[in-house]
Amino acid sequence: MRDVTDMRRSVQLMLMVSGLALGVAGGYLVVKNRDSIGHAMQRLGSAIDKPRRRAQEMSEEVALRTARLTNNPKVNQDWVSRQWDAAGF
């Protein structure tokens, strides 16, 4: 039983060390290549902006339900205001 446990531990240790080595090598390559840093920052920024844009593009029905649920007419007022702004008025 001990041999199996020792073997599992050695395999786990080997996997951990190789994963760490791959991470360090990958990190070095990313830091060395400036273009990849810019690309990664751009992708991160777009990933953060996407949910924000979806929330701002709320439909009229969702705005109405949200206003009713929260007893807050300002939700509808803000939605209408954004629609007028988008139309250019």
Image: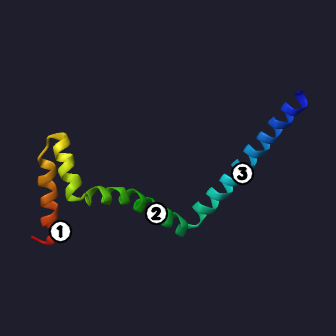
Picture coordinates of residue 84 (x, y %)?
12, 66
Residue lying farthest to the top in this orientation: 1
User: Is 49 in front, or is 34?
Assistant: 49
Secondary structure of the residue carrying tag 3 is helix
Picture coordinates of residue 32 (x, y %)?
60, 64
Residue picked out by circle 2: 43
Q: CA distance from mark 3 to mark 1?
A: 51 Å
Q: Is residue 47 above or below residue 73?
A: below
Picture coordinates of residue 58 (x, y %)?
25, 57
Q: Is residue 89 above or below residue 4?
A: below
Relative placement, left or right, of 45 versus 58 is right
Q: CA distance from mark 3 to mark 2?
A: 25 Å
Q: Residue at x 58, y 67 (%)?
A: 33
Q: Residue at x 66, y 52 (%)?
A: 23
Quarter of the figure that contains the N terminus:
top right
Residue picked out by circle 1: 86
| Numbered disc in front, either 3 or 2 | 2
Secondary structure of the residue carrying tag 2 is helix
Q: Is residue 8 above or below residue 73?
A: above
| Numbered disc in front, either 3 or 1 | 1
The amino acid at mark 1 is Ala
The amino acid at mark 3 is Ala
Circle 1 packing at 10 Å, graded few (<14), some (14-19), many (20+), is: few
Residue 20 - label = none
Residue 21 - label = 3
Circle 3 packing at 10 Å, graded few (<14), some (14-19), many (20+), is: few
Relative placement, left or right, of 52 versus 20 is left
Circle 2 packing at 10 Å, graded few (<14), some (14-19), many (20+), is: few
Q: Residue at x 80, y 35 (%)?
A: 9
Give the colour scheme shown: rainbow
User: Is 13 in front, or is 8?
Assistant: 8
The amino acid at mark 2 is Arg
